[in-house]
Amino acid sequence: MTATATLTKTLVSLREVRKIYRMGDQDVHALAGVNLDISAGAFCAMMGPSGSGKSTMLNLLGCLDRPSSGIYTLENRNVGKLNDDDLSELRLRRLGFIFQSFNLIPQLTVQENIALPLFYLGWEQERSAKRATELAAIVGLESRLRHRPQELSGGQQQRVAIARALANDPAIILADEPTGNLDSSTGVQIMEMLTALHQEGKTLIMVTHEPDIAAYASVQIHMRDGKIDEVHGEL
């Protein structure tokens, strides 16, 4: 399959999406007319060489950036027409992020880091603390609630990041090289955890440069020169 990746029961839809960055006196076409449909419950891995557009794609899908042209629809909402406040609200309520560098706040405990999205959603402290405790148990960190990130291993920090990404019960979890800073055995543990989330019905979109990590996903999307080059796998 080339050019267009189509999965059923569309959650995400991109139509002729382009992203152009101005670098000095030159235009850089980071995305050059992408067409993509992703269904609820999919587990997609995006791969490609440096400069292929996969990171730009993740930023657009995560509403951290806007397309220069084309249409990005998320849950039937045209993302390109949303203002900055609406984009922030969409990110907060419908998206969860897992980063290679964990992005935990060092001054906060495990429980507080997990509960952070709920603070911004206006949850009461008791309710958010209970939710964070439940999520910490899911990722095997119920005995580390009062620890701070520097007191945890890399794998444990990534588990905190996964729990935080689940706090708002997102429609999509976006993972940027989620095993990039981990040793291979810990990476396997993290991928088994993400696979379990997928099996429970969560939608995951992951960027990785590692074929063995991409193999956990049900669909592998290969990008080159700002376009989808080919897609492997079916739901």
Image: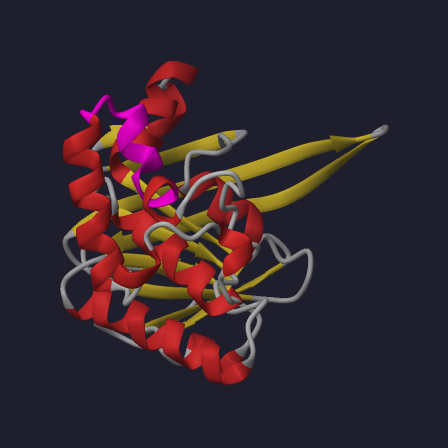
| Region rendered in magenta | 113-124
Towards the viewer: 34 or 211: 211
126 relative to 178 in the view: left or right = left
The location of residue 93, given as percent across then percent down, is 25, 32
**Residue 56, magenta (yes or no):** no
The location of residue 33, given as percent across then percent down, is 51, 45
The location of residue 5, given as percent across then percent down, is 35, 61
Q: Locate residue 22: give its quadrant.
A: top right
Can you see residue 218? Answer: no
- By secondary structure, the bulk of the magenta-drawn segment is best described as helix
Can you see residue 120? Answer: yes
- In this rendering, the answer to whether 140 lies above or below 26 is below
- In this rendering, the answer to whether 178 lies above or below 18 is below
| Quarter occupied by the C terminus | bottom left
- In this rendering, the answer to whether 49 lies above or below 202 is below
How many numbered callouts?
A: 0
Residue ID at (30%, 39%): 115
Towards the viewer: 185 or 146: 146
Towards the viewer: 121 or 130: 130
Residue ID at (26%, 74%): 234
